Image (spheres, grey):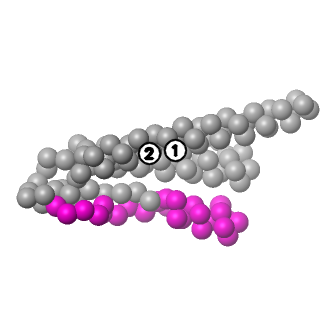
Amino acid sequence: MVPVGDSTMQVIEYALKALEQRAQVTANNVANAEVPGFRAERLDFEGELSRAIDGDDIERVGSPSLSKAPGAPDPTGNTVNLENEVVEMMRNNLLQQAMVEAFNFKAGLMRSAIRGQ
């Protein structure tokens, strides 16, 4: 995406990139659900994004953080819970849709302003 210089668009751009990364992490978890000793991971970006917004410094928002997902390992030492992963995929998909809608709404406002409407 091309930076527009508007903080709302910057937040949306950051969120969409982080949501894409989260989708990749979740897909990796699912792909390794049967691998002995595999530890599921989670990607968090909301906390870092919230701090940047609260501090009115979106330019300095940090990278998303990757951590091990909570949960007890199965007998093979694998911590992937497929139900949790499916829920995470659905949640992530809804957040992506919301960000795309927010982007489209903001772009529509900008188009209207340019046209003088």
Whether tag 1 and tag 2 are in contact, CB under 8 A, the answer is yes
- Location of mark 1 (residue): 95
Q: Residues within 10 Å of mark 1 (few under 14, many from 20)?
A: some
Q: Nearer the viewer, residue 5 or 39?
A: 39
**Mark 2 falls on what kind of element?**
helix
What's drawn in magenta, residue-wise? 45-73
Residue at 79 percent of width and 37 percent of height: 110
Badge 2 amino acid: Arg
Q: Residues within 10 Å of mark 2 (few under 14, many from 20)?
A: few
Taking the magenta stretch, the answer to whether it contains residue 22 is no
Badge 1 amino acid: Leu
**Mark 1 falls on what kind of element?**
helix
The N terminus: image quadrant:
top right
- Location of mark 2 (residue): 91
Direction from residue 95 to residue 68 in the image, left or right: left
> Can residue 62 be seen in this snapshot?
no
Residue at 49 percent of width and 41 percent of height: 94
> Can residue 43 be seen in this snapshot?
yes
Q: Pinpoint residue 55: horizontal percent, then vertical percent.
A: 67, 70
Q: Residue furthest left?
A: 75
Residue at 61 percent of width and 47 percent of height: 12
Q: Pinpoint residue 69: horizontal percent, then vertical percent.
A: 30, 61
